[in-house]
Image (spheres, grey):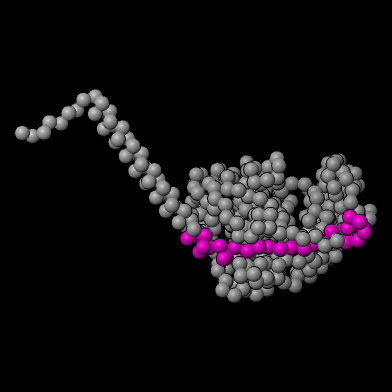
Amino acid sequence: MRPRICRNRDDRFSLTRATFFLWAIMSVTAFGMVSKGHANVLTEVFKRVHPSVVVVQTEHLAPMGEQSGLPASMAGVGSGVLISKDGMVLTASHVVHSADRIVVKFKNEEEIPARVVSSERFADVALLQLERMPKEAVVAHLGDSDQVEVGDQVFVVGAPVGMSYTLTVGHISARRAPQDLTMGFSRVEMFQTDAAINVGNSGGPMFNMEGSVIGIVSHIISKSGGFEGLGFAITMESAKRLLLDQPPFWTGIEGVLLTGPLAAAFNLPQSAGLLVQRVANDSPASRLGLRAGSIVATIDGKPLLIGGDIVLQVQGIPLIGDLSSYTLIRERVGRLRVGDIMTVRVLREGETHELRLPISR
């Protein structure tokens, strides 16, 4: 006689419950395997690409020390990424644009001086040239940011608050077209991300999960100034277009655009001008003889350095207070060749002067 299988209600409930628990255990196990596998992939990609990431250390002279009234050396730190075998490094413009000295530090602690080759203030990207290549250099692969979609997972490597080679992971939260941007970044497309970004991350690479650089970290929008705000990175295609596909352009000037009532208050003979705040050593602006501000003043609640030159024209093109004049000036200066003359008209101590510089490199 075959044994009879009893399938009463309790038995069915017990069987269903057992099946549910078995399914739950298998699901948790499977999820753990996927998560662990995903983590392993990220670990391997990080090991492969992080030697291409660098720490960018800068120095510049502040106009006056807080106590002595004498010029004081100010240090800065950012991040960057090595992109070529001849020593080109991508970083953020605001990290290096007006720096008097730049040193790039690699994973092996090797420190190499660098100079700015090209810098786009309106896009916050810059290109550095190392004095020499480091030992055992690892060059990053530049990806196609046009193929990136909202929701893609990404990771950032940099030096937040000076803590070098820190990895943070997140997603592409949005693609921001130029007309959607704020804070003056009107010429480039940016990625918005929820990956943690802090001071010191600026200029560092944003990688996709294959290890290709798809963006350069720019800034955050945060009420507290911490990472809990919105993070932004310039897309790699924008960086390529501005720094690699066009002639190099770097002035070494950090300035404030004067328009409207401010232009009238400074007695400008035209609608706009650039009040020079800082001039980087050995920059075209320095060789031209431009003078930076030296007196700290507060205007409309913002500290400004006054007493320096106010740029009125470059190559005969007047500053008119919008992006069109900057674009035209960039194109005109970008066409200058060795032996050509760069001309800049400035307002200095109430008088206009024309400064001239033969292009030597």
The segment highlighted magenta reads: 44-71
Q: Nearer the viewer, residue 326 or 221?
A: 221
Direction left: furthest residue: 1
Whether residue 86 sits left or right of residue 321 in the image: it is left
> Image quadrant for the C terminus?
bottom right
**Could you say where residue 163 lies in the image, as x and y percent from the top left?**
65, 58
The image shows residue 222, relative to residue 112, as above or below, that is above
Quadrant where the N terminus sits is top left
Of residue 180 and residue 32, the one placed in the foreground of this image is 32
Residue 8 colored magenta? Answer: no
x and y percent of residue 49 in the render?
A: 53, 63
For residue 170, above or below residue 338: above
Give the residue displayed 90% in from the left and 44% down from the top: 265
Residue 16 position, x and y percent, is 28, 31
The x and y percentages for residue 222 are: 68, 42
> Does residue 252 show up?
no
Residue 206 left/right relative to 281 = left
Q: Quadrant of residue 92?
A: bottom right
Q: What residue appears at the point 81 percent right and 68 percent down from the top-left corner?
A: 287
Instruction: Name the foreground residue: 272 vs 234.
Output: 234
